[in-house]
Image: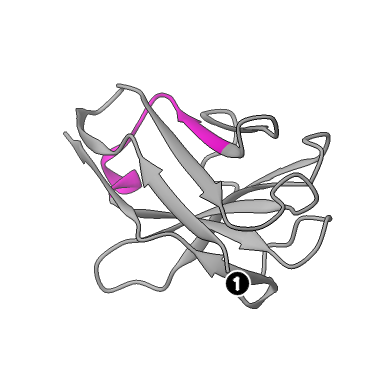
Amino acid sequence: QVQLVESGGGLVQAGGSLRLSCAASGRTFSTHAMGWFRQAPGKEREIVAAINWIGTIRYYADSVKGRFTISRDNAKNTVFLQMNSLKPEDTAVYYCAYSSSRAYSIARNEYDYWGQGTQVTVSS
């Protein structure tokens, strides 16, 4: 079992920044890819960013490219999502997810464990 606990969400004005953190425990973190997903009301959960096991390869959804940065600290079993230039359309519940493999994936079914989510609200 893997426990994932997200933090760092909140209310911010458009153009502002937030940094999400996700602390993992329970199983080996450093040999597994991680991802950040989000789900807005009435919409499906979508991939935002993903990172491979060692942090050398990253993926970003087109909607966040150039504004968001995913990173990880394997010594602290933590993955981060730095979100800059936030827009109202970024409003959603953000989830971190633990992959079954070392390589990242954009498919939800490649992730075995999920956090409880943290709310991000961007006001216009």
Classify residue 35 as left or right of residue 28.
Answer: left
Q: How many labels were placed on the picture?
A: 1
The amino acid on which the numbered mark 1 sits, given as a three-letter code, is Arg
Residue 19's x, y, as percent?
Answer: 41, 28
Closer to the camera, 72 or 15? 72
Q: How crowded is mark 1: few (under 14 residues within 10 Å), some or many (20 or more)?
A: some
Closer to the camera, 51 or 4? 4
Identify which residue is drawn at 24% across, 67% down. 41
By what rule are the colours in the image chosen? one colour
Identify which residue is drawn at 69% across, 49% down. 29
Name the quadrant of the C terminus.
Answer: top left
Q: What element carries label 1?
A: helix
Residue 55's x, y, as percent?
Answer: 77, 35
Residue 115's x, y, as percent?
Answer: 43, 59
Which residue sits furthest bottom? Answer: 109
Magenta span: 79-91
Classify residue 50 as left or right of residue 3.
Answer: right
Which residue sits furthest front? Answer: 26
Closer to the camera, 51 or 46? 51
Tell me, yes or no, whether the highlighted magenta stretch contains residue 64. Answer: no
Where is mark 1, residue-wise? 108
Identify which residue is drawn at 73% across, 62% down. 105
Name the quadrant of the N terminus.
Answer: bottom right
The relative height of residue 2 versus residue 121 in the rendered view (above or below) is: below
Tell me, yes or no, whether the highlighted magenta stretch contains residue 82. Answer: yes
Residue 83 lies in quadrant: top left
Identify which residue is drawn at 51% across, 35% down. 81
Residue 3's x, y, as percent?
Answer: 49, 59
The relative height of residue 81 versus residue 62 in the rendered view (above or below) is: above
